[in-house]
């Protein structure tokens, strides 16, 4: 994710910011420009006087869900439902009358917004109507099964509970279990329908991932009843990916989104260790490309490996396990490259 600045004083603001900590200017994220815009809103005490503020963006207002402090995106004044393009994808939200419901929704929305941001940067459609599918839709509900069916991504609200998520992380042996990871994985199922299922690349998919026509429910039952294959790391990015070609695709898709967003963030923050491959005297910053649109897959991997080594070294220095506990084998490389080609072909 790129860095954002306050439209007024150019001080750093974050993707979730609603105001600048330096000048107090109210800000919101505009999806059409992928940038922060100035808005009219109350400001904290001690901030610069109103006459010093820049004009608010014309015709824009905060999403209606800003009233619940779960969204900082903007929408057009007079919009029918008052929701931003990301919140408009919701079909079901947590029960706000339940204890913890609002906090869970806030966490879910923050993760979902990062997913939608990546999809927009990649130029992917949020509506698969052109390929016979529907619009990407989200259900955030309690006592449900996390998954994807016919364009609807369902996330059990319990996943927003850090303690429960850690319990399930240990139970299922998923060291990278996170809300954003869930959403990226489930979006992979949506985009398999939108970009692969009825496309000319379906046969190539079967060569790379396997035949998705094998019994899906039986494959999942077998996976949950037995330990993963001993050689899963040779062919898959995670143990769950070994269960069925659809899950292999979704896990690989999610991993690709992890990679691109992390690389983009590292470059934006000036911490990408690309200098290690240059001779002494190399000048920072290096030429920047749009990681979501311009880089070849090979170039992405050449940048990704040094970054993961650096992240793991820092994590170990702090006394923690590896931040990135994965190995990209030749088979996984080919699968990630296929995802890259499918996305670039759509963009």
Image (cartoon, rainbow, N blue to C red):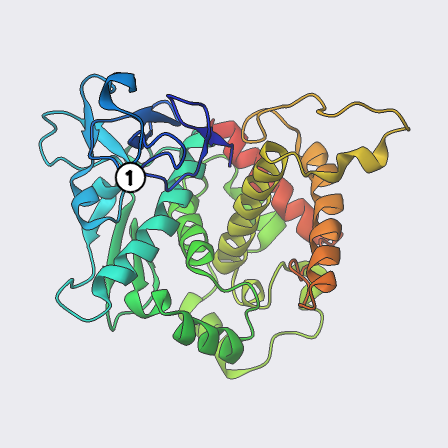
The image position of residue 102, as x and y in percent, is 22, 60
Residue 281 position within the rendered picture, expressed as x and y whole percent measured from the top left: 88, 24
Residue 57 sits in which quadrant?
A: top left
From where the camera sits, is residue 33 visible? yes
Which of 311/234 is in front? 311
**Residue at 51% over, 63% down:** 244
Which residue reaches farthest bottom?
Answer: 225
* Secondary element type, mark 1: loop
Q: How many numbered marks appear? A: 1
168 above or below 22?
below
In this rendering, position of residue 167 left or right of residue 331: left
Q: Residue furthest right?
A: 280
Give me the residue at 43% from left, 46% from top: 192
**Residue 34 drawn above or below residue 231:** above
Instruction: Determine the image quadrant of residue 119.
Output: top left
Q: Which residue is mark 1?
A: 72
Q: Is residue 47 left or right of residue 276?
A: left
The answer to whether 332 appears left or right of 96 in the picture is: right
Residue at position x 83%, y 37% in the image: 276
Q: Is residue 149 visible?
A: no
Q: Residues within 10 Å of mark 1 (few under 14, many from 20)?
A: many
Query: In the picture, residue 296 is in which quadrant?
Result: top right
Residue 245 x %, y %: 52, 58
Q: Residue at x 44, y 51 (%)?
A: 184
Q: Where does the image place residue 171, in percent across and percent down from the top left?
A: 50, 80
Front position in the image: 328 or 322: 322
Left or right, 108 with respect to 251, comes to left
Q: Nearer the viewer, residue 144 or 258?
A: 258
Relative to 267, say whether 155 is above or below.
Answer: below
């Amino acid at each position: 994710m790129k860095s954002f600045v306050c439209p007024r004083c150019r001080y750093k603001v974050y993707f979730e910011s609603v105001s600048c900590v330096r000048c107090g200017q109210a800000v919101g994220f505009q999806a059409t420009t992928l940038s922060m815009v100035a808005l009219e809103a109350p400001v904290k005490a001690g901030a610069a006087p109103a006459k010093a503020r820049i004009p608010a963006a014309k015709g824009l207002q905060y999403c209606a869900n800003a009233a619940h402090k779960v969204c900082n995106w903007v929408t057009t004044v007079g919009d029918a439902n008052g929701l931003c393009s990301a919140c408009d994808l919701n079909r079901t939200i947590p029960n706000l009358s339940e204890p913890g419901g609002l906090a869970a929704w806030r966490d879910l929305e923050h993760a979902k917004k990062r997913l939608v941001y990546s999809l927009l940067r990649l130029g992917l459609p949020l509506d698969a109507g052109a390929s016979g599918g529907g619009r990407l839709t989200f259900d955030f509900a309690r006592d449900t099964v996390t998954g994807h069916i016919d364009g609807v991504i369902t996330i059990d609200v319990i996943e927003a509970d850090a303690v429960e998520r850690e319990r399930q992380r240990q139970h299922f042996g998923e060291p990278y279990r996170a809300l954003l990871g869930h959403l990226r994985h489930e979006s992979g199922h949506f985009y398999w329908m939108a970009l692969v299922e009825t496309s000319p690349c379906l046969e190539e998919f079967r060569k790379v991932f396997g035949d998705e026509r094998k019994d899906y429910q039986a494959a999942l039952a077998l996976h949950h009843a037995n330990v993963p294959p001993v050689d899963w790391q040779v062919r898959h990015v995670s143990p769950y990916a070994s269960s069925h070609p659809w899950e292999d695709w979704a896990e690989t898709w999610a991993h690709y989104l992890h990679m691109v967003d992390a690389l983009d963030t590292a470059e934006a923050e000036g911490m990408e260790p690309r200098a290690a491959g240059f001779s002494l005297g190399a000048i920072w910053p290096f030429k920047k490309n749009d990681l979501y649109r311009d880089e070849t897959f090979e170039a992405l991997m050449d940048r990704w490996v040094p970054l993961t080594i650096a992240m793991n070294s820092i994590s170990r220095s702090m006394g923690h396990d590896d931040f990135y506990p994965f190995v990209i084998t030749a088979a996984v490389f080919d699968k990630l490259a296929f995802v890259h080609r499918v996305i670039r072909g759509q963009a």
